[in-house]
């Protein structure tokens, strides 16, 4: 079985929203989830620079989504860190993170019950609660938004999981299909499967099968006949 891998750069998928009302970390997380998507994740130097630019001329600390066990609010792993090292950085009761006003672009650990301004983000995904076949869902997304979502990274999978939780069907269509001619799975944005999140083993390759994500349980990917009628996720 041939699998196509890909080289990609993650496209801009979110915008940042600065909230000037001061809240503790948990309240800030709830606010972002209710009104936007989540507290911001900063996964690499490029994103950290974007956050630093957003906070130009600010004079206070701002919550970001990194918290105890040092993972992000959206549950994705934290591999990039930019700590402002100070003598109290090892204090175990400081389990949440702000962008430091003293050293722009660097982070400080703070007690989670402290109140600061915070940064939310909005992603570019939308759950459509209409039951359509895969082809109908693809057409709808391309007519009304951009495309059926292509889940090419773990970060995108976390956003998809968050959207899928509100679906009215047990599975939700993704922009994933199997090519009978070429005998491999690929995304509608033409990328192959570098990142995979299948339920169980790699699925049996069947013609006219397409990919969906579980809306409950582990929210893994499954292969289903494209004639099933499901909710679906578009990228905007």
Image (cartoon, rainbow, N blue to C red):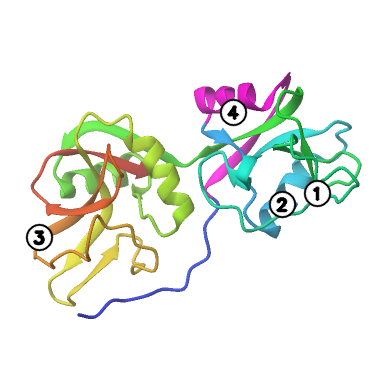
Provide the residue designation for mark 3: 208
Q: CA distance from mark 2 to mark 1?
A: 6 Å
Question: Label for residue 23?
Answer: none
Instruction: Judge whether 147 appears above or below 3 on screen.
Output: above
Q: CA distance from mark 4 to mark 3?
A: 41 Å
User: Disc 2 on helix, strand or loop?
Assistant: helix
Provide the residue designation for mark 2: 48
Mark with earlier residue (2, 3): 2
Category of crowding for the residue at label 1, using alpha-carbon neighbours closer than 10 angstroms: few (below 14), some (14–19), many (at least 20): many
Q: What segment is highlighted magenta in the picture?
A: 13-36
Category of crowding for the residue at label 3, using alpha-carbon neighbours closer than 10 angstroms: few (below 14), some (14–19), many (at least 20): some
Give the side of residue 31 with respect to residue 138, left or right: right
Looking at the rendered image, the disc whose residue lies closer to the viewer, 2 or 3, is 2
User: Disc 3 on helix, strand or loop?
Assistant: loop
Q: Splitting the image into 4 quarters, where does residue 121 fall?
A: top right
Mark with earlier residue (2, 1): 2
Category of crowding for the residue at label 4, using alpha-carbon neighbours closer than 10 angstroms: few (below 14), some (14–19), many (at least 20): many
The residue drawn where x is 89% and y is 32% is 59
The residue drawn where x is 39% and y is 69% is 194
**Picture coordinates of residue 37 (x, y %)?**
51, 33
Provide the residue designation for mark 1: 105
Res 41 seen here: no
Mark with earlier residue (4, 2): 4
Provide the residue designation for mark 4: 29
Category of crowding for the residue at label 2, using alpha-carbon neighbours closer than 10 angstroms: few (below 14), some (14–19), many (at least 20): many
The residue drawn where x is 44% and y is 50% is 156
Quarter of the image with the N terminus in it: bottom left
Whether residue 33 appears in magenta in the rendering, the answer is yes
Instruction: Judge whether 12 appears above or below 206 on screen.
Output: above
């Amino acid at each position: 079985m041939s699998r196509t891998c890909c080289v990609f750069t993650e496209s801009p998928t979110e915008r940042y929203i600065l909230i000037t009302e001061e809240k503790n970390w948990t309240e800030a997380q709830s606010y972002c989830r209710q009104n936007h998507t989540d507290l911001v994740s900063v996964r690499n130097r490029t994103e950290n620079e974007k956050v630093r630019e957003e906070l130009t001329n600010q004079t206070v600390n701002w919550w970001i989504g990194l918290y105890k066990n040092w993972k992000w609010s959206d549950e994705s792993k934290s591999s990039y860190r930019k700590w402002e090292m100070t003598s109290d950085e090892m204090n175990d009761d400081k389990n949440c993170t702000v962008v430091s006003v003293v050293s722009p672009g660097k982070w400080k650990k703070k007690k989670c019950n402290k109140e600061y301004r915070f940064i939310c983000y909005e992603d570019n995904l939308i759950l459509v609660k209409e039951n359509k076949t895969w082809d109908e869902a693809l057409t709808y997304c391309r007519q009304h938004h951009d495309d059926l979502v292509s889940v090419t990274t773990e970060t995108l999978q976390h956003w998809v999981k968050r959207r899928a939780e509100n679906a009215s069907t047990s599975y939700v269509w993704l922009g994933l299909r199997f090519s009978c001619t070429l005998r491999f799975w690929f995304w509608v944005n033409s990328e192959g499967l570098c990142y995979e999140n299948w339920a169980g083993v790699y699925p049996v390759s069947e013609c006219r099968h397409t990919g969906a994500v579980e809306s409950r349980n582990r929210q893994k990917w499954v292969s289903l006949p494209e004639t099933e009628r499901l909710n679906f996720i578009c990228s905007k």
